[in-house]
Amino acid sequence: QVQVVESGGGLVQAGGSLKLSCAASGSIFSIDAMGWYRQAPEKEREVVATIASGGSTNYADSVKGRFTISRDNAKNTVYLQMNSLKPEDTAVYYCAAELVFSCAPQFINYWGQGTQVTVSS
């Protein structure tokens, strides 16, 4: 069974740090891009950061210089280091992974269940 599972959310004061992890497991051949998205109450889901299989990264303007995305391909895991957190970073954070299976011609996008990040002022 294929799973994408996030961990590491929680409550932190403004200016603090958190590190999110997301691991994909199951009969996966390889993983293309991976990314972090977030959804605040009454707002649409937005991209936070993405990382390609080769390591190139992209960030939302709102998190540039504060968040860092990285991945460990051997562990099928992507991380999001979040520093200098602000109350407006409060949201449910979702991981997405483009999973490639040996029986399929192209990747299939999988989402995790989400992890809550709350930043208090």
Image (cartoon, rainbow, N blue to C red):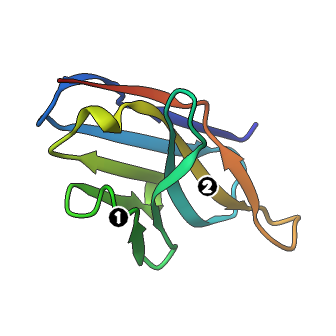
Question: Which residue is under mark 2?
Answer: 97
Q: Is mark 2 on a helix, strand or loop?
A: strand
The residue at the point 57 percent across, 29 percent down is 42
- Quick one: 14 or 26, which is closer to the camera? 14
Q: Residues within 10 Å of mark 2 (few under 14, many from 20)?
A: many
Q: For marks 2 and 1, give the one nearer the viewer.
A: 1
Query: Label 1 near label 2: C-beta < 8 Å?
Result: no
Quadrant housing residue 8: top left
Q: Give the answer, above or below, for where 90 lies relative to 76.
A: above
Q: Give the answer, above or below, for where 78 lies relative to 103.
A: above
Question: Which residue is under mark 1?
Answer: 61
Query: Which amino acid lies under the numbered mark 1 shown in the image of this protein?
Result: Asp
- Quick one: 71 or 39, which is closer to the camera? 39
Residue placed furthest toward the front: 42
The residue at the point 20 percent across, 63 percent down is 65
- Quick one: 9 or 65, which is closer to the camera? 65
Q: Is mark 1 on a helix, strand or loop?
A: loop
Residue 27 at x, y percent in the picture: 72, 50
Q: How many labels does the image show?
A: 2
